[in-house]
Amino acid sequence: MQKPIKLLKGARDRLRSNTFFRSTPSEVANLPKPDFRPSCAKNEFRIINMTSCHEILYCDAIFHNVEKGSYFNKGKTKKMQYGVWEGRRVAVAHSITSKVINTKADFNEHVTNLFRLQSPFVTQLIGFCNVSRIFFTEYHKRGSLDTYLNSNEHITSDATERLRLAVSYLKTLNFLHNQTEGSLVVCDSNDLKGALQNYLVTSDRRVILNDMDDLPLVNRYGKLIQCKHQEIDGLSHFLFSEFSYPKPFQHFNPYLLPSLDAKIDVYKIPDIVQAILLHSDSYRKASLNIWRKLMKINEECKDPSASTRPQTSKVLQAYENLLKSL
C-alpha cells in the first residue's frame, strides 16, 4: 500500500503539534459555541451517516474508492465536480492550470488551511492528492451562500431566521479573526457576489467558510498584509475604503498595494448582512425593522478609518443581543 503523500515537508508532524492557527483556551471560551458537528482528530473526518471518524483519504484511496460525476462549478483556480465515496456524496475540487495564478501554491495553501482550521466553522476535508492536485470536501446540497440567498427556501424564510443566518456568518468570521497568532483575513473577495461564494450553507443552516486559498495572517505583532496581487477594475461601496490603489491614471504595481489588517473584513459585514436580510421582498417590513436596529453598529463597520472600526467580536455581540430580544 502506497504511503500517504505529504502535502508539504513535515506537514503531518506539524499537524500533530501545530498551534499556529489554533485558538487559545481563553479565546475559545469567548467564542460563540458552534452548532453540533461530530468531533474528530485533525487528520480525520466524519460526514453524514458515519458512526465513527475515518482517516483523511490519500491518493490510493481516492483513485480506487471515489466515483466522480459531473462538474457543477468553475472558478479562477479550481473546478468542482460531484463525487461519491462509500455511497455518500462529496465535493471534488480540481486545480486549474493558469499562466496568471500559481495554482500549485493555491492548492497547498487551501489544503493546509483545511487541515489546520478543521472546526464547525469550515468545510470538512475528506481527502487530497497533491500529485493530481485534487481534494475532497463534505458536500453541502444548499450550496454557496450566494446560491442559497436565491433559493426559495431563503426567500420564504422569515426575518428572524435571516438574522440567525447572519449571526452564523459572523461566528465564522469571528473564529477566523481570533487565532493564536492573530487574525486570518478573507482576502479572496473583491465584490459582494465573490464574498458570498466563499461560504457554504449547511443542512442545519449554518454559514461555514469554504474557500481557503487566500487567508493571509495579520499577526499580533503588527505585521500587516496585502490583498490580491492583481489589478481590480473599479471600486465599489463593498470594497474597503483603504483600498485606494491604483489611483486614476496610475499604473498598477502589486508591490505598491496598501497594507491592511482584519478591519477590511469588518468593512464588508454590512453589505453581506444586507444581502442576507433584504435579498427578497418576502418579510421585507420585518427585515427592514431589524436592519434599522443594526444601523448604529453597521455604520461603525463602515467607518473610513480602519483603526476605529469595531472588532468582529463586538459586531457579533450586537447582532446576537438583537437576535435574543426577538
Image (cartoon, rainbow, N blue to C red):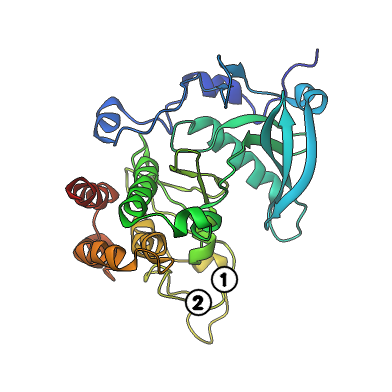
Residue appearing at x 47%, y 25% in the figure = 18
Q: Is residue 179 left or right of residue 26?
A: right
Residue appearing at x 73%, y 46% in the figure = 95
Point out residue 131 in the picture as x, y percentages from the top left corner: 78, 34
Mark 1 residue element: loop
Point out residue 132 in the picture as x, y percentages from the top left corner: 79, 37
Q: Label 1 sits on what residue type? A: Asn
Mark 2 residue element: loop
Crowdedness of circle 1 by 10 Å Cα count: few (<14), some, many (20+)? few
- Is residue 129 visible to the viewer in this orientation of the structure? no
C-beta proximity under 8 Å, tags 2 and 1: yes
Mark pair 2, 1: CA separation: 8 Å
Residue appearing at x 48%, y 34% in the figure = 117
- Is residue 169 visible to the viewer in this orientation of the structure? yes
Q: Is residue 285 left or right of residue 203?
A: left
192 up-or-down from 223: above or below: below
Q: Nearer the viewer, residue 81 or 150?
A: 150
The quadrant in which residue 5 appears is: top right
Q: Is residue 161 left or right of residue 54?
A: left
Indicate which disc residue 253 carries.
1
Indicate which disc residue 14 carries.
none
Q: Label 2 sits on what residue type? A: Pro
Tag 1 or tag 2, which sits nearer the N-term?
A: 2
Count of numbered marks? 2
User: Which residue is the site of mark 2?
Assistant: 246
Crowdedness of circle 2 by 10 Å Cα count: few (<14), some, many (20+)? some
